[in-house]
Amino acid sequence: MASVKEYIRERFFPHIWCPGCGHGTVLKSLITAVDQLGLSKNDIVMVSGIGCSSRIAGYVDFHTLHTLHGRALAFATGVKLSKPQLRVMVPMGDGDALAIGGNHFIHAARRNIAMTAIVMNNRIYGMTGGQFSPLSGYGKAATTAPYGNIDHDFDVVQLAKAAGASFVARTTTYHAPQMVEILKQAFTHKGFAVVEILTQCPTYFGRKNKMGEAPDMLEWFKENTTPIGSQAKQKNPSLIERGVFVAEEKAEYCTEYEKVVERAMKGRE
């Protein structure tokens, strides 16, 4: 592997993430995937919104857009339609993807636009003070739910599948080697790819829910997740499955749009 320094903007370090945050593992795995695929930095555009996870766009030495909260996929759609040859990556947190950004998420999946949506699921709003998010889960504690959250959470995988994403996967920061392989598949997929990454937030989610420090939360990912269709899942249905759930060929939006343009131009002749 090439030096990590070739892929980052050193002038923006040290990073803003709290000690033990899983987002650094995501950054390293993402860089490793890009390096192993031999992708050119000049062909990559990373689009982000606002939040801890979105800060990744400031650290990588790619073409980047740091945009509005929840609107990263809308900006990314514009980039992809105008320059379909570029490889677009969209790192998002809970709110960016599925609260204020939820509408953009389901329609990007429905259209099957060729880009990779990376949903970094730490089950909390970390940057703004530990409020509960659409992924926190029923009964969980947060600064805005001191007596327990009564909102049920989205299942990112099921939502992405139902909305029409043609590649859907889940992994965790404990399973970093698997994360690299899944990201490689997502980056090369010709359609809308969703990768949910369970990542630890010891500062807020871990502390509020008495899950311990970062190593304890990583251990939780190890003990409470299992490969898709495993015998362990059959014995314990509460385990969270990880792996690739969907990988299918489907008409891609930008390609279909080009066909519409061609038909329209022929109609003018």
Image (tube, helix red, strand yellow):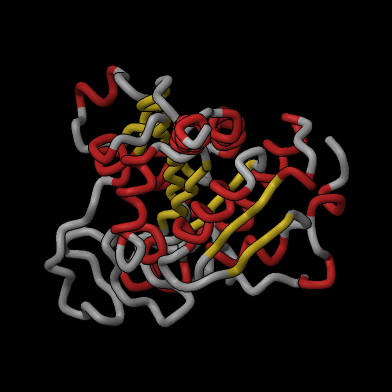
x and y percentages locating residue 126 in the rendered image:
44, 72
Name the residue: 37% across, 26% down: 246
Q: Is residue 187 left or right of residue 217?
A: right
Q: Which of 85 and 217 is in front in this view?
A: 85
Residue 29 visible in the shown view: no
x and y percentages locating residue 256 in the rendered image:
45, 31
Q: Is residue 218 left or right of residue 28?
A: left
Tell me where residue 69 sits by quadrant.
bottom left
Q: In this view, does 184 lie to the left or right of 4?
A: left
Tell me where residue 124 sits by quadrant.
bottom left
Name the residue: 65% across, 44% down: 30
Name the residue: 58% across, 58% down: 47
Q: In which quarter of the image is the N terminus?
A: top right
Q: Is residue 67 above or below residue 105?
A: below
Name the residue: 29% across, 75% down: 142
x and y percentages locating residue 222 in the rendered image:
43, 39
Q: In this view, does 75 lie above or below 112?
A: below
- Count numbered badges in the picture: 0
Q: Nearer the viewer, residue 90 or 211?
A: 90
